[in-house]
Amino acid sequence: MTNMAGHFAVLVGIYNDSIVLTKRAKELRAFHGQICLPGGAYDPTDNDYTMTAIREFYEEVNFEGEVNPFFCFTPEFSPVAKSNIYPILARLNGKINGFNHQEVEKIFYLKLSDLVDNLFKINPNIVRTFHNWCFDYDGEFVWGLTAQILKNLCCYKEVLL
């Protein structure tokens, strides 16, 4: 078995007709204030990256219901974290009742109908890096790896609807 320590997974949770995004709490030491997909580091108690993404989702989002994973994208390499990030797609059947204020400042939803190629632009602040896509949504600036994963998802949107 491959050593999974030091890698991460994020949940691309489809809730009704939207993808769940969070804004990281300002008190967090890493990536504070950034918009991201719920997720985090693999833990040795996790059987696989799907379990990591689901566990982290429940730690960040107060969700009552079922998380039904159905696809894992090829991992993205994060030069910042120096790790692979595994995006896990899942349908969320239940109710979101808020979020963990220690980890999340805000939760918001990206409508699948708004997930189109022309939403994305090259980030003028980081033109020469691999994860250089960005977009503005719901008063927030989304960039980096999160924007890259969502841009990749545009090709598969019909499958998600």
Image (cartoon, rainbow, N blue to C red):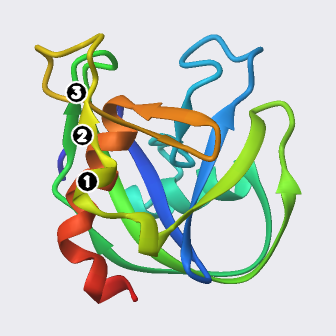
Q: Amino acid at mark 3?
A: Asn
In the rendered image of this protein, does residue 57 appear above or below residue 127? below
How many neighbours does mark 3 have within 10 angstroms: few (below 14), some (14-19), or many (20 or more)?
Answer: some
Residue 132 marker: 3
Q: Which residue is mark 2?
A: 3
Identity, as a three-letter code, of the amino acid under mark 2: Asn
Q: Residue at x 56, y 80 (%)?
A: 17
The numbered mark, 1 or 3, whose residue comes first in the sequence reads 1
- The 10 Å Cα crowd at callout 2, few under 14, some 14 to 19, many 20 or more, is few
Please tell me which residue is depicted at 75% across the width and 33% down the height of the picture: 103
Q: How far separated are the C-alphas under marks 3 and 2? A: 29 Å
Q: Earlier in the sequence, mark 3 or mark 2?
A: 2
Residue at the image point whose x is 66% and y is 36% from the top: 23
Query: In the structure shown, which secondary structural element does the residue marked by tag 1 occupy?
Result: helix
Label 2, label 1: how many angstroms apart (C-alpha)?
38 Å
Q: Is 121 displayed left or right of 26 in the figure? A: left
Amino acid type assigned to the residue bearing label 1 in the image: Asn
Return the disc, 2 or 1, that comes first in the chain's sequence. Answer: 2
The disc placed on residue 118 is: 1
